Image (spheres, grey):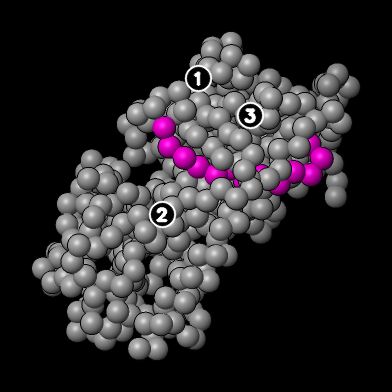
Amino acid sequence: MKKRLICNNTLQESMEVSPHLTFSSNTKKIILKERRAAKAFILLLFGLCIGCVAVPEGYEGIPPGEWRGVLKLENAEFDASSDRSKAVSNYTELPFNFHVTNTTDSLYVTFRNGKENIKVSSIDIGLDRSTAKDTIVITFDEYDTYLKGIIEENIMEGQWVVNYKEGYSIPFIAYHGQDHRFINHNPTDILNFAGRWDVTFDYDKPNDAYKAIGVFQQKGNQLEGTFLTETGDYRFLEGDVLGEKMKLSVFDGSHAFYFESKNINDTLFGVFRSGKHYSSNWQAVKKDDIELTSPFELTTAANHSVDWDKLLFKDLTGKSTPIINTASKNTKLINIMGSWCPNCKDEVKYLQSLLKEKAYQDIEMYSVCYERYKEEEKNLAAISRYKQALDIQWPLRYGGRASKQKSSEDFPFLSNILSYPTLLVLDSNNKIRSIHTGFNGPATPDFENFDTKFRAILNDLTNE
């Protein structure tokens, strides 16, 4: 492949974020043609400039290959030795990695978090007239969020925007040609964080404290793992170990999680940051046999026989309709969820795969979605995009705005709704036979045990 020389630039301009770029495909071609001509002229004059690097020729818009991005979370950097958050810099860096595939035939971005790879093909590149800069918009369709950034050679800088949260955006910058997470060297004097940890989040706030299990795998200074809670896991985390300190992060288009801790006398003291504002202190001790309450026991049914015909939710056209087909004698599943929820997405993908198997093809599936916009029409549109993006074949209903209190009121025969997702299993007579709260998915070592138990429940029902 031919290569051309381009000069390193540092992007100084700020960017005003707007949801979409306003340019046509013809405009894109003209812009790219003009930029190529301008770059050729500049290179002719400054071909011997200092700081030039070689990048592949044959692409338009964004250099292909590895990129390292950093979300800039405002305020605190954690000082583990003092067991509290303390502002020591303007922002905390939450790194994430992605790979750009940009050929004449295809353009997509793959975001990497440990063993998870998220392919995103909804990409627009062109001139943003508000900045007069080449700009890229990478849209996470199923989560209704996007990255928008100015592109100048090997640097991308802009904002991660969450549409359903008013005024919510986090600055980011990304560099081409970098593939490390937190550190780009291999330290040797490091502790081993691998294993199973008994974790307490908000340990310094007794009324808010909650339990979790940290599960980590370490190879050299590279660390992967997750945190399991009673209502779900904290995704595929990836990071590094440096001495007595570890750092982990995840960015999947929906959640931006950052974890840091320091080992002090065999106890981990750390901070957990989520998105723009949330921060929690946590501590942990090594405990190989630590377990959480079974997710099959967290929510119970006060009445197993329900008049389902009176339980009405809107379909995607806005028409009120019964949640299930009560005349059917098949086993049925109802998952209570939100399109914005990654744990819900994990459960949906699991159920999609399961229901394709011959033994479970007669099981009927239904979803009730609780969304985050104030306006009903936006929530219905978000569910429709989600259904299309994931190619969901079963009916999706609209439950209202996301609120566990609202969901509990909609299902008064349940003890409570503690988490999205919550999965109900109904027998051929439409009686509730099992309830599963949350979803600890493929990022966790407990996923295999769940799969075995859930299949046993379905097998018992289908064989009755």
Quarter in which the C terminus is drawn: bottom left
Q: Quadrant of residue 83?
A: top right
Where residue 145 appears, x then y in whole percent? 44, 42
Let me know if residue 283 is in the magenta part. Answer: no
Where residue 102 appears, x then y in whole percent? 68, 50
User: Which of marks 1 and 3 precedes in the sequence?
Assistant: 1
Q: Residues within 10 Å of mark 1 (few under 14, many from 20)?
A: some
Callouts 3 and 1 close, C-beta under 8 Å: no
Q: Residue at x 47, y 40 (%)?
A: 211
Three-letter code, disc 2: Gly
Let me know if residue 215 is in the magenta part. Answer: yes
SS type, badge 1 = strand
Q: Residue at x 37, y 30 (%)?
A: 208
Q: Which residues are magenta?
A: 209-221
Q: Is residue 376 left or right of residue 218?
A: left
Q: Residue at x 59, y 26 (%)?
A: 269
Identify which residue, 268 or 342, lies in the foreground. Answer: 268
Q: Residues within 10 Å of mark 2 (few under 14, many from 20)?
A: many
Q: Residue furthest bottom?
A: 463
Identify which residue, 304 or 52, lies in the foreground. Answer: 304
**Residue 342 circle label:** none
Residue picked out by circle 3: 267
Residue picked out by circle 2: 438
Magenta segment's dominant SS is strand
Residue picked out by circle 1: 74
Whether residue 431 is visible, yes or no, is yes
Three-letter code, disc 3: Thr
Where residue 291 appears, x then y in whole percent? 52, 51
**In the image, is residue 123 above or below residue 311?**
above
